[in-house]
Image: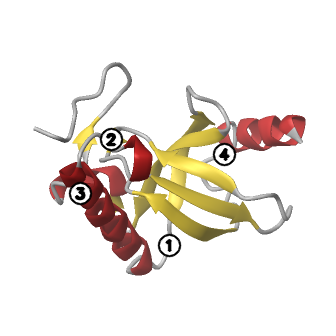
């Protein structure tokens, strides 16, 4: 199974720009992560983290009540962005540093979804390193 996922990620990251992969968004997990299922190969659901942003943590990972509330708003915002999108596509696909999920730039017809989340005030730029807390 792991080998299959590695092959899938490598094929996605090395694909030509006009190559498309059909997938279904199964769930918006939080403000910066979704779960997809690739339909042609009928893979198990994969988690995809949106590159370049950090959103508030939910449930036990939240450091305070206000972070949980912001996490709920960020999740709803991402759900709305996806719901209003005719097409979603990815670029720069790679494995996330924590493993087990894919990291990718995510786009719709309006542009980079990371930018749309930042503009909403429910995400911050993040490119690795220490994260700034949401409980200030």
Question: Mark 3 vs mark 1: which is more N-terminal?
Answer: 3
The residue drawn where x is 32% and y is 63% is 72
Judged from the image, the secondary structure of the residue bearing numbered disc 2 is strand
Question: Mark 2 vs mark 3: which is more N-terminal?
Answer: 2
Cα separation between marks 2 and 1: 23 Å
Q: Where the C terminus falls, by quadrant?
A: top left
Q: Please give the residue where the numbered disc 1 appears in the rendered image.
A: 87
Residues packed near mark 3 inside 10 Å, few (<14), some (14 to 19) or many (20 plus): many
Q: Quadrant of residue 125?
A: top left
Question: Mark 4 vs mark 1: which is more N-terminal?
Answer: 4
Q: Please give the residue where the numbered disc 3 appears in the rendered image.
A: 70
Lateral position of residue 88 relative to residue 56, left or right: right
Q: Please give the residue where the numbered disc 4 appears in the rendered image.
A: 16
Front: mark 3 or 1: 3
Q: Are marks 2 and 3 in contact (CB under 8 Å)?
A: no
Q: Please give the residue where the numbered disc 2 appears in the rendered image.
A: 54
Front: mark 2 or 4: 2
The residue drawn where x is 50% and y is 66% is 88
Front: mark 2 or 3: 3
Cα separation between marks 4 and 1: 18 Å
């Amino acid at each position: 199974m792991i080998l299959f996922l590695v092959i899938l990620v490598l094929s996605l990251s090395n694909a030509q720009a006009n190559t498309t992969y059909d997938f279904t968004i199964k769930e918006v997990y939080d403000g910066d992560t979704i779960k997809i299922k690739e339909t042609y190969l009928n893979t198990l659901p994969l988690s995809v983290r949106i590159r370049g942003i950090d959103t508030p943590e939910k449930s036990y990972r939240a450091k305070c009540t206000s972070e949980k509330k912001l996490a709920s708003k960020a999740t709803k915002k991402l759900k709305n962005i996806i719901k209003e999108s005719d097409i979603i596509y990815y670029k720069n696909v790679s494995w996330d540093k924590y493993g087990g999920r894919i990291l990718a730039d995510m786009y719709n017809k309006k542009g980079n979804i990371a930018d749309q989340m930042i503009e909403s005030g429910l995400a911050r730029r993040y490119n690795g390193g220490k994260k700034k807390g949401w409980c200030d």
